[in-house]
């Protein structure tokens, strides 16, 4: 998910089965304000990706990345590879 922390975009990575807890993310990052970014706001930041299929490597796009700690309990993670037709699976330790 793409969020705005004090109006700076960042990426929040969490399992698909969870809902983002904006208050918890705000507290963890020390941000004063937090909001979900809209597609028009972040679409241009990922010119080589289909909207909604961005891989969780926000650092490659100049965005800070915050990953939910529950992901570390899984041996592997899977995520879109820039399109809705391609998937990457890799050990969480490599992420």
Image: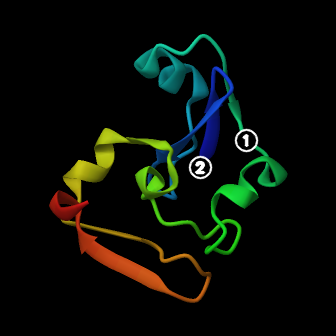
Residue 22 is left or right of residue 30, and the answer is right
Q: Is residue 39 above or below residue 29?
A: below
Q: Is residue 3 above or below residue 34?
A: below
Secondary structure found at label 2: loop
- Pointer 2 or 1: first along the chain: 2
Residue 80 image offset from top left, x and y in percent = 50, 74
55 versus 89 height, above or below: above
Q: Residue at x 59, y 49 (%)?
A: 1
The picture places residue 46, in percent across and down from the top left corner, at: 63, 63
Nearer to me, 51 or 75 = 51
Q: Which residue is mark 1?
A: 37
Count of labels in the image: 2
Q: Dividing the image into 4 quarters, which one contains the C terminus?
A: bottom left
Horizontally, residue 11 falls left or right of residue 70, namely: right
In the current view of this chain or complex, which residue is farthest to the bottom?
Answer: 85
Q: Which residue shows up at 44% across the image and 57% down it? A: 60
Left or right: 10 with respect to 59? right
Q: Which mark is residue 54?
A: none
Task: Determine whether 84 is above or below 59 in the image.
Answer: below
**Pointer 2: what residue?**
1
- Distance from label 2 to label 1 (Cα)? 8 Å
Q: Provide the secondary structure element on which disc 1 rests.
A: loop
Crowdedness of circle 1 by 10 Å Cα count: few (<14), some, many (20+)?
some
């Amino acid at each position: 998910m793409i969020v705005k922390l004090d109006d700076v975009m960042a990426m929040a990575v969490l399992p698909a089965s969870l809902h983002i807890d904006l208050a918890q993310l705000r507290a963890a990052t020390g941000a004063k304000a937090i909001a979900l970014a809209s597609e028009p706001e972040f679409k241009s930041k990922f010119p080589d990706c289909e909207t909604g299929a961005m891989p969780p490597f926000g650092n490659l796009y100049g965005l800070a990345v915050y990953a939910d700690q529950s992901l570390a309990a899984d041996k592997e993670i899977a995520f879109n590879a820039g399109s809705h037709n391609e998937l990457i699976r890799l050990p969480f330790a490599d992420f």
